Amino acid sequence: MSFQVKDLQAKIHELTKEVENKDVKLKESESTISGLQFSNSQMESKIAHMQEQMEFWDEESSKMKERLQASSVRIDEQEKELRRLRKQATDLDGANEQANAARMEIEVKGGGEDQRGG
């Protein structure tokens, strides 16, 4: 019986070592899981922050597009007004040339009459 007791004690010792080894592996796995959960939490926080940033920049982009469109409309209106003013200036130059020509004609006619009457 002594042999059987020693054999059982050896098996108990062997099983105890196995349980201890499995317990160490279990604690390592728990530590790994805890680390992964922490990393996952950090990543979720970063992703949420990035989503907030994307929403902010999407809003800013929309605002800038609206401003750009408004500026484009103002530029079109100003270019239209500039074309109108240029045409008006050209028309006034033409009228001014006609007035100068008429004045010269009057001066020529008037100057000839003054010489005849004097």
Image: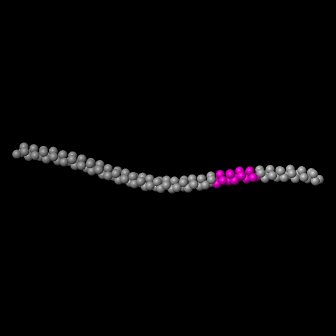
Residue 70 location (% of width, % of height): 56, 56
Say whether residue 90 is magenta.
yes
Q: What residue do we see at 81% from left, 52% from top? A: 102
Residue 76 or 3: which is nearer the viewer? Answer: 76
How is the structure coloured here? Answer: one colour
Residue ID at (51%, 56%): 63
At x 95%, y 53%, the residue is 118
**Whole-percent x and y of residue 25?**
24, 47
Q: Residue at x 21, y 47 (%)?
A: 22
The residue positioned farthest toward the right in the image shown: 118
Q: Is residue 70 magenta?
A: no
37 sits left or right of 6 in the view: right
Instruction: Indicate left or right for 99 with 85 as reference.
Output: right
Q: Which residues are magenta?
A: 81-96
Which quarter of the rendered picture does the N terminus lie within?
Answer: top left
Left or right placement of residue 100 versus residue 113 in this view: left
Instruction: Mark yes or no: residue 84 visible.
Output: yes
Q: Quadrant of residue 74?
A: bottom right
